[in-house]
Image: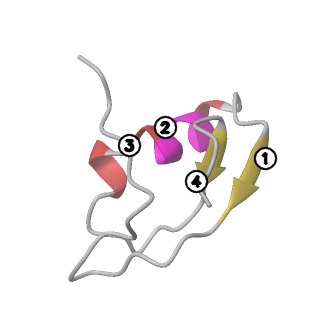
Amino acid sequence: MAVPEDVGCKNENCIKKDECKRQMIYKNGTAREVKSFGGNQEKGCGKYIPIEK
């Protein structure tokens, strides 16, 4: 099941955290809901959304 784009992520260990829209909306307070997805220092979680430039 797909995770809606307005769900933020608070996982600080994910390798993709600085490039992920989920981390960005968690930090700026606009996330509808916050979870911690399974990314780690070697790989992303699979729920990653790139930040649009």
**Residue 38 to residue 18: above or below:** below
**Residue 2 to residue 24: above or below:** below
For disc 4, the neighbor class at 10 Å (few under 14, some 14 to 19, many from 20) is few
Q: Is residue 26 magenta?
A: yes
Q: Which residue has dot 1 on it? A: 33
Q: Give the mark nearer the N terminus: 2 vs 1.
A: 2
As shown in the figure, which amino acid type bears the numbered disc 4? Answer: Ala
Q: Which residue has dot 3 on it? A: 49
- Looking at the rendering, which quadrant does residue 36 occupy? bottom right
Q: Nearer the viewer, mark 3 or mark 2?
A: 3
**Residue 10 to residue 6: above or below:** below
Q: Are marks 3 and 1 in contact (CB under 8 Å)?
A: no
Say which residue appears at 35% left-offset and 81% top-offset: 40
As shown in the figure, which amino acid type bears the numbered disc 1? Answer: Glu
Q: The magenta stretch spans which residues? A: 22-27
Give the spatial CA distance, label 4 vs label 2. 19 Å
As shown in the figure, which amino acid type bears the numbered disc 2? Answer: Met
Q: Are marks 1 and 4 in contact (CB under 8 Å)?
A: no
On the rendered structure, is 19 left or right of 5? Answer: left
Q: Is residue 25 magenta?
A: yes
Q: Which residue has dot 2 on it? A: 24
Mark 4, secondary structure of its residue: loop
Spot occupied by residue 16 in the image (x, y as percentages of width and height): 28, 59
Q: Which residue has dot 4 on it? A: 2
